[in-house]
Image: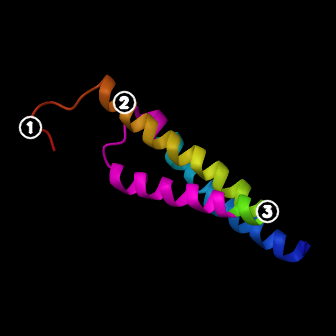
């Protein structure tokens, strides 16, 4: 294990994973996510799951940790979007 390269990976992981925290908090506070694309999040979650699986296959902890956390955060955003949409459906004819 090359510590310098792993530190680089963990720094990148902290940035890309941490970038989802404001989105999770925003959706939670607003109790909705009308501007969040369901299709984009589904494709993104599939990609992150594949990266996670790749990280597990090669034993790369920065990839495993980052994508595991990102998978949870992105899934949380999508789950909240669906939950809040069902709890408070948009009026008929609304965009």
Q: Position of residue 38 (x, y in %)?
A: 35, 49
Per the image, label 1 sits on a secondary structure element best described as: loop
Answer left or right for 85 relative to 24: left
Residue at the spot x=75%, y=69% of the render?
Answer: 9
Which mark is nearer the camera, 2 or 3?
3
From this view, report whether residue 68 is shown above or below residue 29.
Answer: below
In this image, 38 relative to 46: left or right? left
Give the image location of residue 13, x and y in percent.
Answer: 69, 62
Is 85 magenta? The answer is no
Q: CA distance from mark 1 to mark 3?
A: 50 Å
Q: Identify the residue position indicated by label 1 in the image.
A: 93
Q: Is residue 51 visible?
A: yes
Marker disc for residue 37: none
Identified at 61% across, 62% down, the residue is 51
Residue 84, numbered circle: 2
Q: Residue at x 49, y 55 (%)?
A: 46
Mark 1 or mark 3: whose residue is earlier in sequence: 3
The stretch in magenta equals: 27-54
Residue 56: image quadrant is bottom right
Q: Main secondary structure of the magenta part?
A: helix
**Left or right: 9 with respect to 2?**
left
* Residue 66 image-quadrant placement: bottom right
Q: Would you say residue 21 is visible in this rendering?
A: no
Specify the quadrant of the image occupied by residue 34: top left
Q: Is residue 73 above or below residue 44?
A: above
- The answer to which of marks 2 and 3 sits earlier in the sequence is 3
Q: Residue furthest front?
A: 57
Residue matched to label 3: 59
The answer to whether the residue labelled 2 contacts the one labelled 1, judged by CB atoms less than 8 Å apart, is no
| Numbered disc in front, either 1 or 3 | 3
Neighbor class of circle 1 (other Cα within 10 Å; few <14, some 14-19, many 20+) is few
Few, some or many residues within 10 Å of mark 2 (<14, 14–19, 20+): some
């Amino acid at each position: 294990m090359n510590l310098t390269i792993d530190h680089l990976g963990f720094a990148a992981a902290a940035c890309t994973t941490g970038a989802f925290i404001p989105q999770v908090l925003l959706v939670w506070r607003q109790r909705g996510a009308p501007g969040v694309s369901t299709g984009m999040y589904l494709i993104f979650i599939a990609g992150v799951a594949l990266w996670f699986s790749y990280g597990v296959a090669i034993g790369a902890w920065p990839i495993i940790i980052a994508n595991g956390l990102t998978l949870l955060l992105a899934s949380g955003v999508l789950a909240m979007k669906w939950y809040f949409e069902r709890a408070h459906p948009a009026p008929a004819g609304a965009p």
